[in-house]
Structure formats: C-alpha cells, structure tokens
Amino acid sequence: MFLNGLNLQMHRGMHSCVRLTLPLPSSALPASGSLGIISARYYVAPLVFRQNKGMHGFFKKANCIFAPMLNLTEFLQLRQHLPVIDVRSESEFEQGHVPQAINLPILNNEERKIVGTLYKQQGPKQAIKEGVRLVGPRLSEILAQAEQIANGKEVLVHCWRGGMRSNNFCWLIERLGIKSQALQGGYKAYRTKVLESFTQPFQLIVLSGSTGSGKTEILQELKKQGEQIICLETLANHKGSAFGGLGLGEQPTTEQFQNNLFEEILQLDLNKRIWIEDESIAVGKIFVPEPLWKNLRTSPIVKVDVPREVRVQRLVEDYGKVDKELLLDAMKKITKKLGGQHFNTAKEKLLENDLATTADILLTYYDKAYTKSLENRESRIISEISWDGTHIADFVKEKLNHIDT
C-alpha cells in the first residue's frame, strides 16, 4: 500500500487527492509500528481533499486513500450518540464551534500561523512538509487523546473545510483501529446551515414588557407548560440592559451564540408558534441575527404590564448581591441618558445601600426607552395583560397559553 520516498500527486482539476510520504526526525515517530512507518526515517501522510465518485477508480489505481465523508444531515444525526472531534486550532475553536465538540488540534495556534505563512510564501509542498515536521513530536499525545475521546466508539471529525486536517486525522486514528468519518465541507458547511436557519419563516409571538417584568421567567414557565420558546437572553448569558451581564460571567462570541441558537431551532416545530422575548438587536456584546430580529420586530406582540413597585423589588432581588462598584460602573454607561441629576441621586442611594430607590430611579430611564421601542409597533399588540408578579404557573396557564395568534 505504501509508497517509498517523496511522492506528491495533485490532480487539480479533478477534486484532487494527494498522498505524501515525508521524512520525519526519528524522535518524532510514534512508538507503534501500525502507523504506516516504512523505515526509521519515513512516515506516510495521506492528504485527501475531496472524494469524487466518478474518479474513484482512477485514484484507487493511483493508490490513494479516501476517508468516509458525511453530509451535514448525516453528521447532525450521528453526533447525537457519537463524539465529535474538532481538529482546528484553539483560537478557531474559541471563536465558534459545534456544541459538545471536543477540540483536539492537529496544528495549534502558533503552528497554524507558521504553516499558513509558508503556504503563502512558498506554496503547498513546503507548507505540508513543515506541518508534518511540527506535528510529529505531538503525534503520540494526539493519538492518546483521540483514544480517550473515542472510548471504544466511532468518532466524527471536522476541520474548517473538510480538507487536509480532518482527513489526515481520520487516517491516523484508523491506524489505531478507531473508526471515523469526516464532515464534508467541515465547520464551514455547519456555519452555512446556521446562518440559513435564521431566514426561516418562524411563527413568532413576542413577549413584551418593561424592565423588571420577569419576561425570562415567563418564557421558562411557558416552556414547562408545553409551549415552544427561544430565550435569547439565556443563550446570550445577558439580561439585555447596561446591568444585564452583572453576575453572569462571560458572554459567548456572537458566532457561538448563533451556533447555540441554531441548536435550539433544530428542536422546534416551525409549523407551530414560538414565544420569544422582545429584544433590541444587541444583547450585551452579542448581536441577534438580523433576519430573525426583523421577523421579531414584525411579529404579533403580547404585552405584560407589571406594577412598578413589583418590578423594583425584582431588580433588587436580581442585583442586590452584586458588588456596588460594578453596579456603579454600569450606571456610568447610561449617565447621559439617565441625566446628571438622576445619576447623582441614584449613585448616592446606591452607596447608602438603598437599592430600591436606586432601581426606581433607573426605571425612569428604562421605562421611557421601552415606551419608545413600541412607538411604531403598537398596532401589533394583540393582547395586553396585567400581572402582579405572583403565581407564575397560574398566570401563564390562565392568561397566556390560550392566546389566539
């Protein structure tokens, strides 16, 4: 099966397949003899770009290896019970990844930068050589981690475009007897599907209400009672105001938020209504996908009216344990909109630990902003319901579940 020496075959116009035997330092070679080692100085690295069924016979005669490829639909089904390995670099993974995927980089951040620069300056041949040289010393560690992740199961693998990294990785781990399949088109194909999903004709019903009305809690109760929901604030790990990130930790990247949102959408029946909280296009540092947000802004609205004193108490409960310096920093972000006098009074009351008065002052600004956000959408309000903030299960059952959209 193996070719001796350096053998690089590239059929550019025919969905190319490449098989390459490259020299490696002896210290870089894996201990196992089952990894395609021809001699103490050579290691076989098959580089498979894309399978073309019409050319399969030609490439088979050329002694090329084809990694099994999955389309996205197959991948999404199989990943429900098989582990997914993302072989992209750490920074690529951190920017956005398939939820539950495990990152096991073929090239780490620095190595990817080196190989990428070589590719641009000297072409693919030198880049491939350098990539193999860099990866060599870490092969044993990579393979050991792959065995641990697989745990006796088949694994699904992807890189950015379903090319060299994923196919080489599949070839390597199959030398250890780990069955694997690569995602055709890689993470790029997944991202394309993610972005397409937001253009679908969702039957949204928008839950609206002033700051402190408990909209997120209402959404969660709707879900408990069998309704479909999209909770943007939960996915964004942010409550939407200048104070919305306090006590919640880091937000995901916008890309990861979109991925997580897509995963929620996969669970929904788009032939039925979906409740969603009224939001601006920005939730903290994250932006709601524009097609979905435009849908939200033109959908029917159910407005929940909660007394101001109840909303003040809710805000005190939500933010009462947050460090006062963090609260003050958040207040400074809205000083201009709040007004200097209101800001100074709110600051004074905050430092006196009078959180109720502080919250009441802040609602002066937020209530005006909420009223303005509804100015051009009042005709879309299909129901306006009062709630005293208690007995949420009864409220949802009696007032919201039976709303006719």
Image (spheres, rainbow, N blue to C red):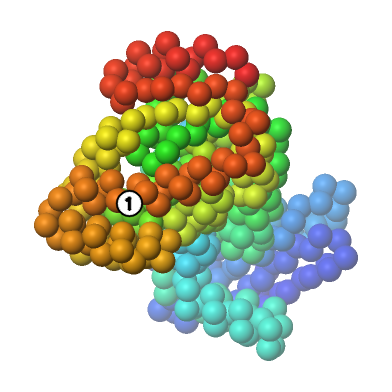
**Number of numbered callouts drawn:** 1
User: Furthest residue to the bottom?
Assistant: 121
Quarter holding residue 128: bottom right
Which one is in front, 321 or 81? 321
- Where, quadrant-wise, is the N terminus in this rendering? bottom right
Q: Horizontally, is 67 left or right of 208 in the view?
A: right
Which one is in front, 163 or 342? 342
Q: Horizontally, is 78 left or right of 233 in the view?
A: right
Which residue corresponds to the image point at 58% horizontal and 58% vertical from the top-left? Answer: 159
Residue 86 visible? The answer is no
- 367 is higher (above) or lower (below) than 337: above
Tell me residue 177's x, y (percent): 49, 47
Tell me residue 110's x, y (percent): 47, 78
Q: Which residue type does callout 1 highlight?
A: Leu
Tell me residue 277's x, y (percent): 49, 36
- Give SS at disc 1: helix
Q: Horizontally, is 62 left or right of 158 in the view?
A: right
Quarter holding residue 15: bottom right
Q: Horizontally, is 48 left or right of 115 in the view?
A: right
- 146 is higher (above) or lower (below) than 271: below
Which one is in front, 94 or 325? 325
- Where, quadrant-wise, is the C terminus in this rendering? top right
Which residue corresponds to the image point at 37% horizontal and 49% vertical from the top-left? Answer: 364
Give the residue number, with chain letter if any, for mark 1: 362
Residue 265 visible? The answer is yes
Which residue corresponds to the image point at 65% horizontal and 50% vertical from the top-left? Answer: 290
Tell me residue 181's x, y (percent): 60, 46
CA neighbours of label 1 inside 10 A, class few (<14), some (14 to 19), many (20+): some
